[in-house]
Image (tube, grey):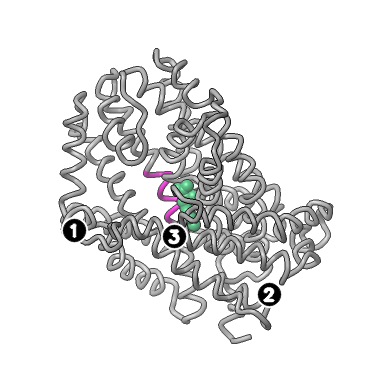
Amino acid sequence: MSPSDSPGAKRGGFSSGLGVLAAALGSAVGLGNIWKFPSLTGANGGAGFLLVYLLSTLLIGLPLMVAEIAIGRQARANPISALRQLKPHGAPWWLVGVAGMGAAFLILSFYSEVVAWVFAYVAKALTGSLLSADPAQTQASFDTLVTDPVQSLLWQWLVLAFIGSILLLGVTKGIEAVTKKLMPLLFLLLILLCGYSLTLPGAARALSFLFAPEWHRITPAVVLTAMGLAFFKLSIGMGTMMTYGSYFTAAQNIPATAVRVMLADLSVSLLAGMAIFPAVFSFGFAPSAGPSLVFITIPAVFAQIPGGQVLLAAFFILTAIAATGAMLSIMEVPVVILHERQGLTRPRATLLTLLLLMLLGAGCALSQSLLAQFQPGGRTLFDWADYLSSNLLMPAGGIAIALFVGWAWGEGAFATQLSNHGQLHNRALARWLCLLLRWVTPTLILLVMLAGLGVFGGA
Ligand code: PFF
């Protein structure tokens, strides 16, 4: 074990149970809840899709989240050092931490650009320059933003600097303090928007769009989509939850926390769907997916509602809050690795991460303007970053983490960590989770991955 595998005693951490919950939930809740979940659910068979998503969350998401947090808390170190520390000999498991750091950079380079659009929209919504009942007009505003290289880059840098400045404050005063304030605000805004939206005439149609089961739509490809979503939603497979686990308090009940995070994250997704679709249906729009729903349809919908400017600003502030917690958690992975393994001070590690992201992220920021023609293999750099992280790095990381706990670290050590060294009586739960992690979770993820890579065709 090298000296950098055992970080010094002075290490940041979350100070309370509430702080742990806010930070972990802050990581899970993100852009994924606002449009990915509602539109995928609506487009893929409503309640049937939801059921498959829940099963994937139970069989893949929860066991992996628990596994990552347990590894992190046992080692109290960054993902690379943690895996080296728990299994210093044999297979090079620490490479999973290296891959996680790569995934963090890749995800951040495209995620930060979408968040950049969200921040730009908050500014536009507040000044009232977004509202137009004509979708052609809202489409034109969006195109102007994304095809302007200067705006795309500046907004991305602003977002990165904002997230970086929170991280500079440290784990307790930065991540924990900010997510503790933002999470309640997010719920409040979401419930208000949802309450309002459900009074609109399109509410019944929206609810049946979201929740009426259409079993014939549940094809193998849809099952795989649902599993992929479970992965992305719970921030697993790339060391994020492992890193946060290393900041957990010793008394925190890991499985109970994971279940709470999963349930709260699911509630945010459902509330987001119930806030968005009634409004969309009430004004005769078609439910579309991806950026067009959030950046083009939503402004056109809100333009028709009394008080639409306030509601629109609230919607984008809510999305910005969700994205902030998620970005903090992704960026923390390289920051803590550079800090603990390369011996950089935390502020220097944060600044280096920021600098690297500005360079790497520029490829994604400019992929609809200066680099629009640069499409190796038929994808823009933005699409490659999205594709490689979701379809390759995160699932591969998930398989490795499941196998690490199931076979290398072993049930005994895992159970000891889950029971807080015997204080909680959850031995049977640990056994079941270990069985899942040994056999079921890696097999299922392998299927997701192969489908994502198009092995079964049509992916
Ligand atoms: N869970 C976040 C979302 O749903 O938007 C995205 C995410 C966060 C992915 C953290 C990966 C991660 F490590």
Residue that label 3 marks: 389
Residue 251 place in picture, x, y as percent? 72, 56
Task: Tell me which secondary structure the magenta stretch mostly adopts.
Answer: helix
Query: What's under tag 2, amino acid-wise?
Result: Leu
Q: How many marks?
A: 3
Question: In the image, 252: left or right of 421?
Answer: left
Residue 245 visible in the picture: yes
> Residue 257: percent from the left, percent from the top?
66, 48
Q: Does dot 1 land on a helix, a strand or a loop?
A: loop
Disc 1 marks a residue whose amino acid type is Gln
User: Disc 1 or 2, which lies upstream in sequence?
Assistant: 2
Question: Which circle marks residue 436 in the picture?
Answer: none
Q: Residue at x 60, y 45 (%)?
A: 261
Three-letter residue code for mark 3: Ser
Q: Secondary structure at mark 3?
A: helix
**Nearer to the camera, 67 or 53:** 53
Q: Which tag, 1 or 3, sits closer to the chain's start?
A: 1
- Residue under circle 2? 86
Q: Residues within 10 Å of mark 1 (few under 14, many from 20)?
A: few
Q: Is residue 140 above or below residue 446?
A: above
For the magenta stretch, what is the residue range? 320-327
Please tell me in which quadrant of the rendered image residue 144 appears. Answer: top left
3 or 2: mark nearer the eye: 3
Q: Is residue 178 visible?
A: no
